[in-house]
Image: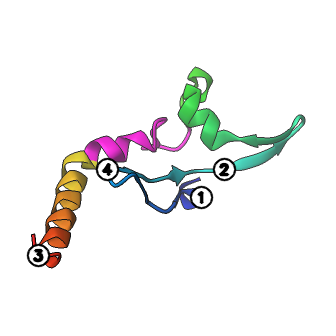
Amino acid sequence: MRRSITVGDITEEGGLNMTGEISANATVQSKSGRFNYAYYIHEHDAGGANLLTPGTEKKFLEIPGKKNEQKWAEDIEKEIRNGLDKAGW
């Protein structure tokens, strides 16, 4: 599942809002068709079950965001400052 995590493009909306995308898709074949267990773990708390792999978190996409929020905000601010400096502001 870790290898399936991908980062999409960052898009700008109206000059003020930026949107990025991260996805994880880990599927297995089940009796009822394809089953995306990455989605099930993240969005449905793995049905309340414990995860088998030590260190695996159920909210595996949210935890890095919360952990790195301050650093990423500083990185974004730095890029904005650099862009403004280059534009002569």
Q: Which of the numbered marks, if any, corresponds to residue 24? A: none
Image depth: mark 3 or mark 2 in front: 3
Image location (x, y in percent) of residue 43: 56, 31
Which residue has dot 1 on it? 4
Which residue has dot 2 on it? 26
SS at circle 1: helix
Q: Quadrant of the C terminus?
A: bottom left
Which residue has dot 4 on it? 16
Categorize mark 2 by other alpha carbons within 10 Å: few (<14), some (14-19), many (20+).
some
59 displayed left or right of 16 = right
Q: Tell me: residue 79, above or below residue 45.
A: below
- Is 59 inside the magenta-drawn segment? yes
Question: What amino acid type should be assigned to the residue bearing mark 3?
Answer: Gly
SS at circle 3: loop
Q: Earlier in the sequence, mark 4 or mark 2?
A: 4
Image depth: mark 4 or mark 2 in front: 4
Question: What amino acid type should be assigned to the residue bearing mark 4?
Answer: Leu
What segment carries the magenta color?
A: 52-67
Image depth: mark 4 or mark 1 in front: 4
Q: Earlier in the sequence, mark 1 or mark 3?
A: 1
77 displayed left or right of 10 = left
Question: What amino acid type should be assigned to the residue bearing mark 1?
Answer: Ser
Query: Hey, which residue is sitting farthest top in the picture?
Result: 48
Q: Are marks 2 and 1 in contact (CB under 8 Å)?
A: yes
